[in-house]
Structure formats: C-alpha cells, structure tokens
Image: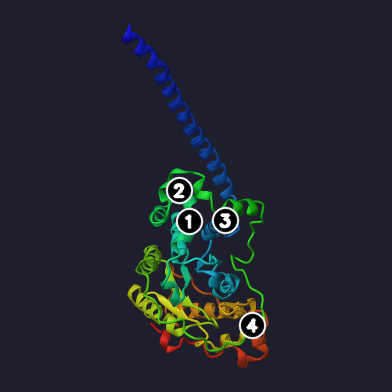
Amino acid sequence: MASSFTFSSDRPAEVSARVHLFRIALFLAGVVAVDRFAGGLAHYAFGRVQTGEGGGQINGSLEHSSSADVLIFGNSRAKHHVDPRTLAQELALSTYNMGCNGQGIYYHYLLESLALQRGARPNIFVLQVEPDNLYLANKERVVLFAPFIGECPEVREVLQTTPHFTLKTKCSTWRFNSMLFSIASNLGEETSDAAGGYRPLPRRAIAAQTPTASSGPAPAVAEDVLDCYRKFIRKAQAQKIEVVLFTGPRLDRDEQFEQVGKEALLQLVEEEQVRYLVLDEKQYPVFQKPELYYDQSHLSGEGAQILSTILAQRLRLEFTPPSGTPSDPSAIPPMLPLARLPRTEFEENPESNPLRDNMVRPAAFNR
C-alpha cells in the first residue's frame, strides 16, 4: 500500500511538469513564428525602400549599379562632392554615385560584393579615400548589411566579427532592428534619382583657412582596414574593372596627422598597381577659397562642380589612349569628344579656371 500511495502522489507532479514544458515549448514556438512573420514583413518592406541611409540607400545603389559604366564609392566627401552627371557628360559613360555618409571601406567592399554578385559589370570604380581613413575600421556601421547575410558570403564574413552576430543570423527581426524607423519613414518615398546618388551641399559663410594645431602624431594604420582596401581592389580587378582612387580637397587638413596614412596609401597604390589621383587644395589652389565650401571638410555644390569637372578631365587623361593607339574594346569604351559644359564663371574669367593648366597630367601622377 505504501508503494502504491507513493506512485500516485508523484503522478500529478509529473503531469504538471510535462504541462509546464509543453507551455514553454508552445511559447517558444510562438516567439519563433512571430519572429519569422515580423521578419518577413520587415524584409518585404526593406526590399521596396531605395532611399534613406538606414539601409534603403543600399537597395537604391544596387538597383542603379547594373546599368552604370562608372561607379563612385566613398563617404560623405564622395556623396556630396562628385556629380555623376558631370562625369557622364565628360566621359560619355553612364555614372552613378554610391557614396554614403559616415561609412568606410567595409561598407564599400560589401556594396561592391553585392553589386558584382548581382551582375554589375561597370568599366571603372572610382573610390574616394583620405589618408586618415586608414586608421579606423568603422566596422560596426556595416550592420546595415544584415538583411543580406543569406545572400552574400562577404557580408557574412565581415559581420561575423561584429557583436551579436549569431543572434542576427538566427533572429529574422534582429537584422532590421536598427533600421525599422528608416524603413517606415522612407517606404513611400519617390525612388527616382535624377542626380544619380549625388547630393550637393549649400554654400555657407565659414572662416578662412588658418593654420591649425596638429592633433598629434598619426596613429598606426589599421591592418584590417588596409587589407579590406586590397580586397576591394582585387575583387574589381578579377572582373577586369579599372580602379581609380582619388583624394579631394578640404580646409582642415592636418598634414602631420595624415602622414602615416599617406605613406601607407601610396604603398598600397604601388603594390596593387591602381591609379591614384590627388585632387587636393595644394594641387588645385582654387580649393583654398572658403567660399567654395559648406564646412571645413565639405565642398558646396559650386565647389563640387569644379571638383567633378577636374576629376572627369583627369579620368579622360587616364583612359584616353595616345593618338594613333586603338582602344581595347573589351576594356574602356571609346571616348567621345568632350561635351561643352554650360557657361561658367571660368569662361568669363579664364585665368581663374583650375583646368587651364591641368589638361596634361603633372609628372607626379604619371605611372
């Protein structure tokens, strides 16, 4: 009797435990189902957004990359400085600006990887780079590519070194947790982009350039950043895409702080055999004028047009073969004669035209 009584008294506890476990399993199944459903909705909405720097801009860039002959990469100093319409007019090649504010080489590398994986085959990649870009990775900012983890191996490779990577891969909604507001606010936005990704900045009254105290000796170059530049270049070269790096002007340049990065950049260019154009305020003194700037490190729309024209002219010099030398039809399409730009202040005053004495490459840029 004692044994029978003990058995019967344990049975309700056992049943209760099973019920408890069942409820937990049911709850977890519900969480997974809700996550998959909400993640599916977020992915659907994200795929229809092509504006906004919360991820939609990536979609817009990928959409336009498939039809462009020239793609421009870089941070805000590319996005606000290079007008693809000017390059297209000068080069007779369709051009799109894929620059993004506040991003570094990891963003450009992943955007390049996705574009190539989706079939983009432009002729030229133009990558804006500053010597001090080689000091910091800013890798945490590429979480915007989390929705593409299952599509692109390079995205998974880069993001697996960021915090909470495992959770991002298992949780459908987590991939969108930093961009939900941007998706919602840009979902109904017009997707046409007449400016080709370029966003000019207004002119503002800023102080004239004055010598500034150095921020100290330059830090060491981040080797992972340098390696990512190499990956960007080699991935393009593997597809027979020409890569051109360029450095633009600014008023707040700190030569001492940039020195280590400048040396590493020049070594990178030499090792990888890519073109590097220095279009800074020293090579083109017109960019020493404060009235051409929005702030100390960003040109206004007027200054951007001057830089875009210079960049286009320099690219023509790089890719137009010497007289009598046939173009390689499998590489760069034949260039048409330079189209005449609308009348500018430089036509009124030729002496102020920064292109007047720069139609032939300075010896320092000959490779």
Quadrant occupied by the C terminus? bottom left
Q: Are marks 1 and 2 in contact (CB under 8 Å)?
A: yes
Label 2, residues with CA under 10 Å away: few <14, some 14-19, many ≥20: many
Residue 121 appears in the rendering:
no
Label 4, residues with CA under 10 Å away: few <14, some 14-19, many ≥20: few
Mark 4 vs mark 2, CA separation in Å: 44 Å
Q: Position of residue 306 (x, y in %)?
A: 59, 81
Q: Nearer the viewer, residue 330 or 360?
A: 360
Q: Is residue 309 above or below residue 351?
A: above
User: Is tag 4's residue or tag 2's residue first in the polypeptide sequence?
Assistant: 2
* Figure quadrant of residue 197: bottom right
**Residue hosting label 4:** 206
Q: Hey, what amino acid is under mark 1?
A: Val
The extreme front residue here reads 2
Mark 2 vs mark 3, CA separation in Å: 19 Å
Secondary structure beneath label 2: helix
User: Is tag 4's residue or tag 1's residue first in the polypeptide sequence?
Assistant: 1
Q: Are marks 2 and 3 in contact (CB under 8 Å)?
A: no
At x 39% / y 20%, what residue is drawn?
14
Mark 4 vs mark 1, CA separation in Å: 35 Å
**Residue hosting label 2:** 168
Q: Hey, what amino acid is under mark 4?
A: Ile
Secondary structure beneath label 4: loop
**Residue hosting label 1:** 143
Q: Position of residue 123 (x, y in %)?
A: 46, 67
User: Is tag 2's residue or tag 3's residue first in the polypeptide sequence?
Assistant: 3
Q: Hey, what amino acid is under mark 3?
A: Gly
Q: Hey, what amino acid is under mark 2?
A: Lys
The extreme top residue here reads 1
Q: Which mark is residue 56?
A: 3
